[in-house]
Amino acid sequence: MEGLSEEESSIVLVVRDFVDRDVKPDVRRLDHDNTYPERLIEQMKQLGIYGLAVPEPWGQAQVSMQCYALVTEELARGWMSLAGAMGGHTVVAKLLRDFGTEQQRDRYLPSMATGRVRATMALTEPGGGSDLQAMRTTARRAGDAYVVNGSKTWITNARRSDLIALLCKTDPDAVPQHRGMSILLVEKGPGLTVSRDLPKLGYKGVESCEISFSDFAVPTSALLGGIEGRGFSQMMSGLEVGRIQVAARAVGVGRAALEDALRYAQERETFGQPIWKHQSIGNYLADMATKLTAARQLVLHAARCYDSGARADLEAGMAKVFASEVGMQVALDAMRILGGYGYSTEFDVERYFRDAPLMIVGEGTNEIQRTIIARQLVKRNTVAP
């Protein structure tokens, strides 16, 4: 595979085989029953998928962002929920790798590499949405601890994660507000409540929850990096990974939809010929394949930019916006091609159509992403007075 080492190419192929052999035969039942995929998650741990972002000496198989994006695409091609089950985990691994103290890295990264400890991040609040600076969750210093109060929502894997990277305000009076934000590495205990699983259109099997904090005590050693007020910039850096991952998920869902539509268009006949030969259907297929190819290249471009060490927020935002919109459109076009069968729960296309919208609103809505893209464009191309 272009741009990957031989070992990385092998990793992608192993995940592809796992999806075809173990995921696809059972995914419809798991999705319709909204069943947590325990067996598949354990297999992902055994394959080393949870350690792909953990470097030595804590892990053994850190890969390039290009490889990680292609692994994500393969998982989402099988079931988008599986890619979601390791998305936040990878962001937290990056936060620890880049900003954690040596003690924090030594404590968490070895177990995260094997999947024995799974991690997630908590940003969104019930009244805040994409406006992170409006958050109300606070962590006030009390001796050698922080006392946390507030709530978060749409926290994926909240029940099954052992570690939560919590973005909160350690200085609620800071101006500007983002300078008062910090990340706390939170483990569950008294005062932290996972209150309910949120009902969802798609993204089944993996829970998305509300969590609340009521005088929840966290030791000061849990402050990521050991210095207050850096949480917003730390999380924004981590979200470069998150947005590339979400974009890759969208490509995977779109690819699954295209594969199903292409197979059906060759098997289904009307007026004495396969329906792909009808111009309207052929045009759909051509446009679907073209858009998906463009989306994948945009994701890989963002991944290469990230791998180079350069700032990748612009590129990750572009990839996320374009790929998510393409994934949604391709899922709809696949439904058009399958007709009534595309609407039937006996086929997988309706699942793609339910899963695809998450990538449009998740990890920062596309409307917010466009604002970020415009801001970065101006910042990178400021005209001197």
Image: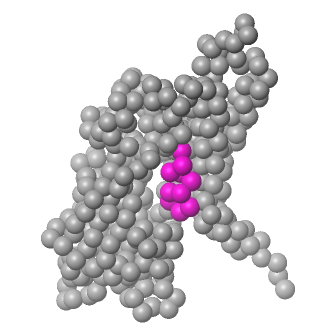
In the displayed structure image, the side of residue 194 where residue 53 appears, left or right: right
User: Is residue 359 a member of the stretch shown in magenta?
Assistant: yes
User: Is residue 343 a member of the stretch shown in magenta?
Assistant: no
Figure quadrant of residue 216: bottom left
Q: Nearer the viewer, residue 168 or 30?
A: 30
In the displayed structure image, the side of residue 174 where residue 300 appears, left or right: right
**Which quadrant does the C terminus fall into?**
bottom right
Which percent across, then down, holds residue 368? 60, 66
Residue 255 visible from this viewpoint: yes
Which percent across, then down, holds residue 207? 33, 51
Measured along the vertical axis of the image, is residue 202 above or below residue 104? above
Which percent across, then down, holds residue 64? 51, 47
The structure residue drawn at horizontal position 51% and vertical position 74%, both measured from the top left corner, is 131
Q: How is the image coloured?
A: one colour
Where does the magenta region start and end? Answer: 356-365
The structure residue drawn at horizontal position 47% and vertical position 63%, both measured from the top left corner, is 238
Measured along the vertical axis of the image, is residue 277 above or below residue 333? above
In the displayed structure image, the side of residue 371 where residue 153 appears, left or right: left
The structure residue drawn at horizontal position 77% and vertical position 19%, both measured from the top left corner, is 278
Figure quadrant of residue 170: bottom left
The structure residue drawn at horizontal position 64% and vertical position 42%, both measured from the top left corner, is 329
Instruction: Assign the magenta stretch its main secondary structure.
Output: helix
**Which quadrant does the N terminus fall into?**
top right
